[in-house]
Structure formats: structure tokens, C-alpha cells
Image (cartoon, rainbow, N blue to C red):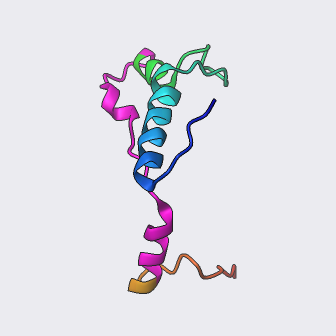
């Protein structure tokens, strides 16, 4: 049974565990992966990487996108028009 996530802090905790499982332990079967996790495949290709490389921390994008929209700069919420 999956745990009930009660807070943003818990969400980030479980998301971090999932990222570790997905990039470090889970077998992948895409082209060229041969059932290996991404970190192990990168090591096979000659990259000397620590486990931390595969552990990009999760973030909540709701606050990030509204922060950028309010502060100006790149307007992520505006539609793009092609010339």
C-alpha cells in the first residue's frame, strides 16, 4: 500500500527516494541500456561519477513559475508566436 503524503516536505522526501531508485537501482530497457540503471550505464561508457550525480533534488515548480512571472524576465506563462 502506498503511503499517504501529508505535506510538501513528505512529498519531497518520497520524490527523492523515487529518483534514487529510478536512476541508481531500477533496470532500464531502452535502446542501449541492457537492463542497467542510468548511473551504471554511464559508468559503462567511461564516466567516473558518484551516486550523487544521479540524485538531482526534486523541487515544487508551482512556486518557481509564479516567482518568475511576478519578478519579470522570461515570461513562462506567455504563448510564443513563430514568425
Name the residue at 54% across, 75% down: 76
Name the residue at 45% across, 23% down: 24
Residue nearer the viewer, 26 or 49: 26
Image position of 60 with respect to 69: above or below: above
Any part of residue 78 in sight: yes
Question: Split into 4 quadrants, where in the image is the C terminus?
Answer: bottom right
- In the image, which residues are magenta? 44-69
Is residue 51 rendered to the left or right of residue 80?
left
Q: Is residue 72 magenta?
A: no
Where is residue 68? Give x, y as percent: 43, 77
Question: Split into 4 quadrants, where in the image is the N terminus?
Answer: top right
Q: Is residue 63 magenta?
A: yes
Where is residue 14? Give x, y as percent: 47, 39
Residue nearer the viewer, 20 or 81: 20
Image position of 22 with respect to 58: above or below: above
Any part of residue 72 in sight: no
Where is residue 77? Give x, y as percent: 58, 79
Is residue 20 rendered to the left or right of residue 76?
left
Location of residue 20 (image quadrant)? top left
Name the residue at 43% across, 46% down: 10
Name the residue at 44% across, 24% down: 39
Image position of 60 with respect to 33: above or below: below
Is residue 81 rendered to the left or right of residue 17?
right
Amino acid at each position: 500500500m502506498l503511503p499517504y503524503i501529508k505535506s510538501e516536505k513528505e512529498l519531497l522526501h518520497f520524490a527523492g527516494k523515487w529518483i534514487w531508485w529510478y536512476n541508481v537501482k531500477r533496470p532500464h530497457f531502452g535502446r542501449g541500456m541492457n537492463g542497467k540503471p542510468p548511473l551504471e550505464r554511464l559508468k559503462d561508457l567511461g564516466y567516473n561519477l558518484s551516486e550523487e550525480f544521479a540524485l538531482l533534488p526534486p523541487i515544487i515548480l508551482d512556486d518557481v513559475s509564479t516567482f518568475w512571472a511576478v519578478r519579470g524576465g522570461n515570461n513562462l506563462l506567455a504563448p510564443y508566436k513563430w514568425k
